[in-house]
Amino acid sequence: MTQPEGADDLREAARPGAGEVTATVIVDAPAERVFAGLLAWERQSDWIPFTRVRVVEGDGREGSRIEAVTALGRATLRDEMRVVRVDEPYEIGVVHHGQLLRGPGVLRCTQLGRDRTQVVWHEWFHLPGGRAGRLAWPVLWPGSKLGLTQALKRFARLVEQGRLP
């Protein structure tokens, strides 16, 4: 039996990297609705600034390929992901496997009450640039955390307003 094309690269990308960032938000909505909002990949464009997200292959669930392109002026960052786990309504696991962004990520929903859910977004990135990348990470980390946190706050507002999913 042969491995699917790119399996070794995906396995390597799935190892946690040295760059780690976590953001959390409480959403006043049931976990099922919050989870459905997270799984609406192409709607991420509504809550992640300057970013267009599309499902490249599959139905958005396990095994699907997702592409997120962030453009700010002429600068463009392409993020390629594979959905590796969907445990509804609790967890979505992805592996970033592009040229620049690599590493595992997870979105977790925890029901806190009937209409209250905590969302945790956690990423472990492989840092490009070897030692220079590791040295730069403490400077880049606060901006990464702030960006994820702000995006999750926008996500929460959209879910609470009934505009997502």
Image (cartoon, rainbow, N blue to C red):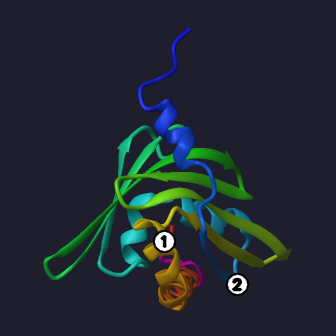
- Who's the residue at 58% across and 48% down the image? 14
Is mark 2 in CB contact (under 8 Å) with mark 1? no
Under mark 2, the amino acid is Asp
Marking on residue 28? 2
Give the residue number, with chain letter if any, for mark 1: 131
- Who's the residue at 56% across and 81% down the image? 152
Query: With respect to residue 137, does 124 lie above or below?
Result: above
Marking on residue 31? none
Observer-nearest residue: 158 or 21? 21
Q: Percent from the top left, x then y, of residue 131?
A: 48, 71
Query: With respect to residue 56, does 39 lie above or below?
Result: below
Sequence-first disc among 2 and 1: 2
Determine the image quadrant of residue 161: bottom right
- Who's the residue at 52% across and 20% down the image? 3
Q: Secondary structure at mark 1?
A: helix
Under mark 1, the amino acid is Arg
Observer-nearest residue: 114 or 154? 154
Determine the image quadrant of residue 156: bottom right
- Who's the residue at 71% across and 51% down the image? 88
Q: Secondary structure at mark 2?
A: loop
Spatial CA distance of label 2 from label 1 is 42 Å
Q: Which residues are magenta?
A: 159-163
